[in-house]
Image (cartoon, rainbow, N blue to C red):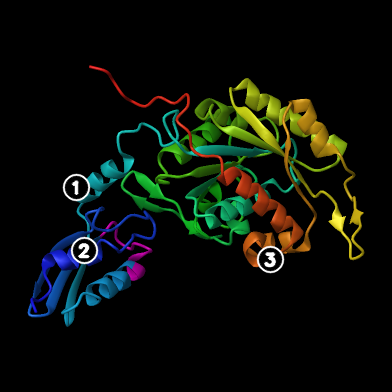
Amino acid sequence: MPGPTETDLRSALSRVIDPEIRRPITELDMVGDVRVADGAASVELKLTIVGCPAADRIEADVRAAVQSVAGVDSLDLAVGVMTPAEREALVTRLRGTRTTQFGPDSLTRIYAITSGKGGVGKSTLTANLGVALAQRGLSVGIIDADVFGYSIPGVLGITGSKPTKVGALMLPPIAHEVKVISIGMFVDGNKAVSWRGPMLHRTIQQFLTDVHFGDLDVLLLDLPPGTGDVAISLGQLLPHAEVIVVTTPQAAAAEVAERSALVARQTGQSVLGVVENMAGLPQADGTILRLFGEGGGAAAAANLGTSVLASVPLSMALREGGDAGLPVVLSHPEDPAAAAILTLAGTLATRARGLAGRPLGLSLS
């Protein structure tokens, strides 16, 4: 039988996926010289940067891929780093021809999760919803746009994680198959962020342009509560985003929540619907303890001319999951709160990325 060829090796290496960029290393030009003779293979692997956090995994996957080729008895793997020119070429390839990842021509569904006041569980909902969507096979990203009250890394269990910088791009950390970026990844410890409007705008803009999310099906934005600078900036940067308003059943909270939706509409965004969180505590006898009253979500939806997308009950498991960095949709999917969020994810997941009203970049000659 003929021995293995270079083509066989490269075919096997094409199945090795970069865990940060989520594309085959052969497409990323991370594979250099490949040779094989008399069962002895040699491969040149070029990592994107010095100290690549995924280096060990990539090297292990390369070894496994090459050794899976019939006829290969040994492997000499030379691990190096891309030259500045190669790295710049990779950045250009990843950026493509788009000036922005999520412009009007993007097919990514963008949902801005907002609320009128803090403490309504907006970040916990965003994190769990992102994980639930990823569980359904969608490519999902989360931008923690709550610069002052960033909490998404903690809820997803990636506190201390930082993006990998490749040239002018940043590769976001991945938690439970969700790509995540947060200002909390750039500050030390529990340091407070005290910035004025221009800095906030620039930060959000960089998250949208300099962080490479790849081709996402869904992008979730965890907005700060209220109607401040970040909400206005996102309205300007992503006027085609759809807003999901989070409120508790309490009438006072629902009234404040409506204002955040009205600001979104003023910037051109549409309001998809309302999620009522903390909607009662289920009791052992089957009754519901309405700690925060009832009817706030329905009232807000009626006043905004939209619908209630989900009603999420109070849940110890939901709170414990947020504290532990393990979303309840993974740890206790049977929990009533998890079930409500999973149902919401199912609703959003069936909303196909459409072309209606989007420029296609075509010209007639």
* Residue 56 found in image quarter: bottom left
Q: CA distance from mark 1 to mark 2?
A: 25 Å
User: Residue 195, how many percent across, how many down?
Assistant: 58, 37
Q: Does residue 3 appear to the left or right of 213 in the view shown?
A: left
Q: Residue furthest front?
A: 1
Structural crowding at the residue carrying mark 1, measured as other residues with C-alpha within 10 Å and reported as few (<14), some (14–19) or many (≥20) = few
The amino acid marked with disc number 1 is Ala
* Residue 36 found in image quarter: bottom left
Residue 332: give its label. 3
| Circle 1 or circle 2, nearest the eye | 2
Residue 85: give its label. 1
Secondary structure character of the magenta stretch overall: loop
Q: Quadrant of the C terminus?
A: top left
- The residue range painted magenta reads 47-57
Looking at the image, is mark 2 or mark 3 earlier in the sequence? 2
User: Residue 339, how many percent across, how many down?
Assistant: 70, 56
User: Residue 37, how many percent across, how many down?
Assistant: 7, 76
- Whether residue 124 is situated above or below residue 234 in the rendered picture: below
- Whether residue 286 is situated above or below residue 296 in the rendered picture: below
